[in-house]
Image: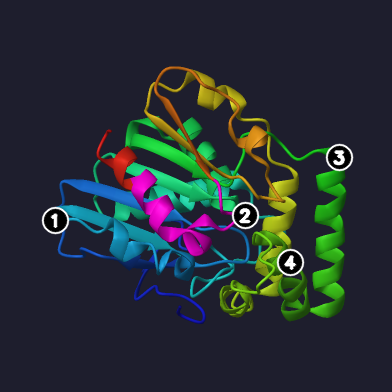
Amino acid sequence: MNMVSIADKSIVLRNGSVTLAYKDTMPQGNADTVVVLLHGFCGSSAYWETLLPLLERPGRRIIAPDHRGHGRSSAPSDAIYTMEQFAEDAAALVEELGLGPIILLGHSLGGYATLAFAERHPDKLRSFGIIHSTAFPDSEAARDNRDRAVAAIREQGIGPFVEGLVPKLFASREDGSNEVLIQEAIAIGRGTTAAGAIAASLGMKERPDRTAILESSTKPVLLVAGQQDGVIPPERTFTTSRAGVKQVLLEQAGHMGMIETPEELAAALNDFIEGK
């Protein structure tokens, strides 16, 4: 797994305040299907590195950006990165690259941004999904945890913070078989700027309830949860079972299915992308 990011291209977005780094599997264009993958907090496009080869198909273009303040993207000086700003970054990238309706899939923080995108730009979507994420806002306890995270980053820096955070994202394995994966995810997390992590934490803290988006959207929707997710349990992901919504439970995954169980997650994503 790449230590910081797999992004090999970058673009200055329309507002001029963000340079977004991204991975593009088909930069020459001419794709029948475009899939955009949004990573989680203190991650980067490298979160998708193992998954990408399992998703590639003829005529399918996959784009995986680094969020502002993460990976190789720039870190604007805003005190708070709202979910709407993350969504607008993705929308600007789609526009700059001249992409048609996309399939947007977001992990954790990326799922919050995906829901904001679906609310603001439904015309740009063919379908969308959230992975180890939720449409619910933070609980009071979670909001307090955001404040503690901000304080920890300010006091100790990003390194110690991600060293404490990342192991909690993985399902427990008594044989230690996921220790290498945990260390790789920590290395990726260290690529997040301290200011970016603080601004993203505060943005997640203030995000609104978007369960209505899942209920009212006319687009196909995918909800993916990990049976062993200690951060966002399945019941906070599976908030609707209306027609057009597909639910997938990864029984061996915690919060990091794209790293822990990539083959199982890829099978679910491929089925969704292909409309099965």
Residue 68, picture quadrant: bottom right
Whole-Å distance between the Cαs marked 1 and 4? 37 Å
Counting residues from the start of the chain, the first of labels 2 and 3 encountered is 3
Could you say whether the residue bearing mark 3 is in a helix, strand or loop?
Answer: helix
Q: Decide if residue 60 is in sight here.
A: yes
| Amino acid bearing label 2 | Gly
- Asked if residue 233 lies left or right of residue 151, the reply is left
Segment tinted magenta in the rendering = 251-269
Q: Which of the numbered marks, if any, corresponds to residue 140?
A: 3
| Amino acid bearing label 4 | Leu
| Residue at the disc numbered 1 | 58
**Cβ atoms under marks 2 and 1 closer than 8 Å:** no
| Amino acid bearing label 1 | Pro
Whole-Å distance between the Cαs marked 2 and 3? 23 Å
Is residue 34 found inside the magenta-colored segment of the image? no
| Residue at the disc numbered 2 | 254
Q: Residue at x 68, y 33 (%)?
A: 136
Counting residues from the start of the chain, the first of labels 1 and 4 encountered is 1
| Amino acid bearing label 3 | Glu
